[in-house]
Image: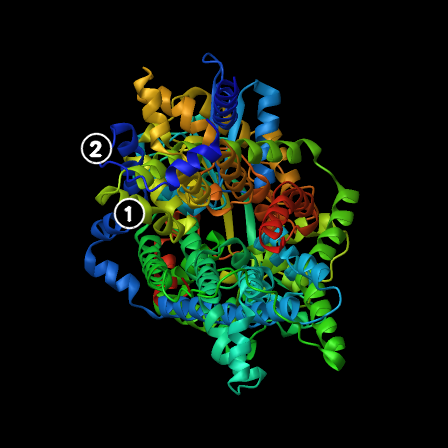
């Protein structure tokens, strides 16, 4: 009978579609972790893979921007599906710590990291360090013509020659560092100048490639983007310039991680954090992204400028706080 | 009973009895009305939480004016450019003796096969000069002009030439006839196409984000990345909703007006062709140029990146996974759309009343809602009121249903109009329950239409980007989100295989369906 086949076909279609769209249900007894990853996609994925190979615990990775994921955790509250959050920078986790959403990290984990890169109350830890730099294209500008301080990029002579990424957390940290070092007015002036004379890019890789392709002379980025592009392309035209003498342009920031208080698998979450701080975990991370390992005594083998030769400003992650001032200032000057 | 008999019954002047629609019909419609109002609730809730003064402060600032300027300039520029290209092309291919008209018609609709965010990445990968407003207008015009060209060409083909001939005998020259007779006759289809394009410009996200033009959608996404679901994003959404509703209002006003009726008897003749003579070369060059920049460059660049990308690395398992997720989600979305479209259609066709009027207007309302704002509001409401749905594919399917229901409604409704209710009533008198009567009588009649509706939704859902970005379950990538993730990191070669697959499984079928619908004679 025609209608029966018709009906059966219709039902099969519907059921097929709906079941295919439902994720496979997992066996109930097996613990799985959910990692909110604000770090680079590859870093989170490689880490999850290595951790599963070592412990047998599968990690589901949700990629987003650090600020987005942290705000998401705030909005989710007790219901958050996340167990561990891994961000590009410390301020978002500071914010979560202030709101009492983070669990205290095991002392054994914190002890392998330097004290000044760990939250005072032990709720988050720095994982790797990176340094703010200016990437420049030698065909468009000589290194000797670069300003002594990052503040000078907000001057009219840099019209159309400096790129920046106002939405990136690291840029916002830099803005906070300028507030701490030179006061709010100076920071506002800097942002206003950059908005007037600089070119806005949507993310750091886009900005760096613009320098590499000669579309803009300089961009303010983190050091490791350059090494990532070098690994992809081999030889680069662009070069890195490090600010010295404690200028805000050479700010050192840390990628950070924390376990959520609401996690249903606190033991495994701590296990993942311990792995991230361990020598093995740090090697996995710094092999994927050319950052400085924070594990005491470890050094990077990616050909970075040695960590102890950097001359960063005396602004610690604790000073940077939750960086909300930066976002407010950006809104005031109309950057977003 | 055969469909033709049922159609003749329906045509026989039967007036459906007004009876109370069953709860099974009411529920889906009310649910849909409620869901489509979520964005409004979301904006109000967020503004309430932030405080109205803060909300106003967030709205009334130079940054928002800048976004408004960009959005309106893009919308105007693209709509005008599409109008000019669409109209001239339709005339050239329908009314002139340009050699190779048919082939040109098929070639020049190829942009239908390439999602806008794919063609924009190919342009940006060609040169950074295509970033910004100018590039955005160029790229969007080239990917949207068929939306005007096709309906205008169809209208032009079916126009009765006697109207124009009368004008000629009354002393008008060709240009006079065109502006005083032809253009007014084309106006409805031209306007409908223009409004559709304008609406697309308001809600487009992926392409503009890649081109680097800040409009409301890209700014809302930026706010989402900065602070998840915040008052700022909600306030920008409010402006976007107002703009979309203004267009919707315009469309409703325009729709139905300006119908032209032919009073002559018999079928209209084919219109005579204008001899281009020495202008033929110019016409050919015009078509050639449009083909080269409209589809040649995007497809060529894609082929180039595909060659580069696959030689470097070909992550077959990841590509396979993304393809499977895309297929599964689109199948689910299409199925859900059908489940909702049938009751809505039944309500409209069989139970005229206040709710049916709502159901009637629903698709237009849904069509004007930006996917990004739907997704934002779904995230918010799922998290706070239905946590079981949060970060599940179910929520994403709901978003698909809201976004794509309009596509399913037209064919389903047309088919339901032909399925006479008497047939079901006969089945009822023979002892069938109302559900069983529907399944055994009406369903088989509308089955072909359901298939068409399913295909339309499925194909469009394959290339959905914004809602998928915000709502997909942890760890799930689709072809569209993979293209987006790679292009936003300037990894064009890595994006190419996903983009190519997207064109093969979704773009090409859409292209074939659309061109066949309009170009067949």
Going 36% across and 22% down the picture, which residue do you hit? B437
Snapshot quadrant of residue A214: bottom right
Q: Chain of mark 2?
A: B
Quarter the C terminus of chain A occupies: bottom left
Circles 2 and 1: CB atoms closer than 8 Å: no
* Residue A111: percent from left, percent from top: 48, 30
Q: Which is more toward the observer, B31 or A176? A: B31
Foreground tag (2 vs 1): 2
User: Could you classify mark 1 by the number of other residues whose Cα lies within 10 Å: few (under 14), some (14-19), or many (20 or more)?
Assistant: many
Q: Secondary structure at mark 1?
A: helix
Using the image, determine if residue B171 lies above or below residue A285. Answer: below
Mark 2 and mark 1: Cα distance apart in space:
33 Å
Using the image, determine if residue A304 lies above or below residue B146. Answer: above
* Residue A238: percent from left, percent from top: 69, 62
Q: Which residue is mark 1?
A: B42
* Residue B95: percent from left, percent from top: 63, 70
Residue A8 lies left or right of residue B313; in this view the side is: left
Going 55% across and 56% down the picture, which residue do you hit? B207
Q: Which residue is mark 2?
A: B20
User: Could you classify mark 2 by the number of other residues whose Cα lies within 10 Å: few (under 14), some (14-19), or many (20 or more)?
Assistant: few
Question: Do discs 2 and 1 share a chain?
Answer: yes
Using the image, determine if residue B503 lies above or below residue B130. Answer: above
* Residue A18: percent from left, percent from top: 47, 26
Q: Chain of mark 1?
A: B
Residue A50 lies left or right of residue A99; in this view the side is: right
Q: How is the image coloured?
A: rainbow
Snapshot quadrant of residue B420: top left
Q: Is residue A21 visible?
A: yes
Identify the mark nearer the N-term, 2 or 1.
2
């Amino acid at each position: 009978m025609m209608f029966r086949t018709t009906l059966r076909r219709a039902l099969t279609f519907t059921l097929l579609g709906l079941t295919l769209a439902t994720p496979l249900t997992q066996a109930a007894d097996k613990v799985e972790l959910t990692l909110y990853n604000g770090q680079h996609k590859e870093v989170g994925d490689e880490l999850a893979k290595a951790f599963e190979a070592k412990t047998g615990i599968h990690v589901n990775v949700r990629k987003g921007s650090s600020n987005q994921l942290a705000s998401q955790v705030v909005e989710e509250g007790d219901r958050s599906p996340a167990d561990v959050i891994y961000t590009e920078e410390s301020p978002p986790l500071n914010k979560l710590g202030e709101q009492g959403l983070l669990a205290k990290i095991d002392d054994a984990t914190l002890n392998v990291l330097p004290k000044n890169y760990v939250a005072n109350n032990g709720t988050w830890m720095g994982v790797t360090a990176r340094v703010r730099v200016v990437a420049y294209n030698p065909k468009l500008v000589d290194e000797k013509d670069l300003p002594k301080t990052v503040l000078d990029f907000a001057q009219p002579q840099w019209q159309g020659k400096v790129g920046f990424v106002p939405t990136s957390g690291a840029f916002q940290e830099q803005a906070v560092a300028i507030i701490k070092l030179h006061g709010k007015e100076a920071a506002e002036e800097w942002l206003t100048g950059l908005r007037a004379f600089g070119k806005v890019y949507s993310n750091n890789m886009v900005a760096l490639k613009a320098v590499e392709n000669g579309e803009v002379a300089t961009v303010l980025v983190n050091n490791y983007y350059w090494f990532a592009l070098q690994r992809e392309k081999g030889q680069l035209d662009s070069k890195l310039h490090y600010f010295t003498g404690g200028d805000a342009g050479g700010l050192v920031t840390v990628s950070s991680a924390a376990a959520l208080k609401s996690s249903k698998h606190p033991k495994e979450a701590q296990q993942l954090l311990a792995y991230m701080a361990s020598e093995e975990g740090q090697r996995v991370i710094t092999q994927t992204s050319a950052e400085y390992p924070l594990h005491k005594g470890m050094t990077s083998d990616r050909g970075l400028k040695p960590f102890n030769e950097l001359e960063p400003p005396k602004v610690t992650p604790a000073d940077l706080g939750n960086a909300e001032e930066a976002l407010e200032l950006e809104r005031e000057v109309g950057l977003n | 009973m055969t469909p033709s008999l049922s159609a003749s019954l329906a045509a026989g002047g039967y007036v459906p009895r007004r009876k109370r629609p069953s709860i099974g019909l009411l529920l889906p419609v009310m649910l849909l009305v409620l869901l489509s109002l979520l964005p409004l609730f979301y904006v109000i809730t967020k503004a309430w939480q932030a405080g109205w003064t803060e909300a106003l402060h967030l709205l009334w600032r130079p940054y928002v004016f800048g976004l408004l300027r960009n959005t309106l300039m893009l919308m105007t520029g693209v709509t005008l450019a599409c109008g000019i290209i669409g109209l001239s092309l339709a005339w050239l291919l329908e009314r002139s003796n340009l050699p190779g008209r048919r082939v040109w018609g098929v070639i020049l609709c190829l942009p239908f096969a390439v999602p806008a965010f794919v063609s924009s990445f190919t342009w940006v990968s060609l040169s950074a000069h295509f970033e910004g407003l100018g590039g955005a207008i160029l790229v969007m015009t080239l990917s949207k002009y068929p939306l005007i060209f096709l309906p205008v060409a169809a209208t032009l083909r079916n126009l009765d030439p006697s109207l124009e001939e009368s004008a000629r005998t009354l002393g008008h020259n060709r240009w006079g006839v065109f502006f005083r007779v032809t253009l007014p006759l084309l106006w409805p289809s031209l306007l409908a196409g223009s409004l559709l394009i304008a609406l697309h410009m308001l809600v487009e996200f992926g392409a503009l984000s890649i081109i680097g033009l800040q409009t409301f959608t890209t700014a809302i996404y930026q706010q989402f990345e900065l602070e998840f679901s915040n008052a700022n994003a909600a306030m920008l959404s409010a402006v976007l909703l107002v703009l979309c509703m203004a267009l919707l209002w315009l469309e409703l006003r325009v729709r139905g007006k300006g119908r032209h009726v032919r009073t002559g008897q018999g079928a209209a003749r084919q219109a005579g062709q204008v001899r281009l003579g020495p202008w033929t070369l110019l016409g050919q060059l015009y078509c050639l140029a449009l083909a080269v920049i409209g589809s040649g460059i995007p497809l060529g660049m894609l082929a180039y990146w595909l060659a580069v990308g696959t030689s470097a690395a070909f992550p077959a398992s990841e590509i396979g996974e993304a393809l499977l997720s895309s297929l599964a989600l689109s199948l689910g979305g299409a199925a859900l759309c059908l489940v909702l479209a049938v009751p809505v259609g039944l309500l409209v066709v069989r139970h005229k009343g206040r709710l049916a009027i709502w159901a009637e207007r629903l698709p237009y309302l849904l069509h004007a809602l930006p996917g990004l704002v739907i997704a934002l509001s779904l995230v918010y409401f799922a998290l706070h009121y239905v946590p079981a749905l949060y970060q599940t594919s179910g929520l994403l399917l709901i978003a698909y249903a809201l976004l794509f229901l309009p596509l399913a409604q037209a064919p389903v409704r047309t088919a339901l109009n032909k399925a006479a209710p008497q047939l079901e009533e006969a089945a009822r008198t023979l002892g069938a329950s109302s559900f069983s009567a529907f399944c055994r009588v009406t369903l088989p009649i509308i089955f072909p239409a359901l298939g068409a509706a399913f295909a339309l939704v499925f194909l469009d859902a394959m290339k959905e980007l914004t809602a998928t970005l915000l709502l997909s379950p942890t760890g799930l990538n689709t072809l569209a989100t993979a293209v987006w993730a790679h292009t936003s990191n300037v990894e064009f070669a890595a994006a190419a295989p996903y983009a190519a697959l997207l064109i093969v499984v979704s773009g090409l079928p859409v292209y074939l369906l659309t061109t066949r619908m309009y170009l067949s004679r």
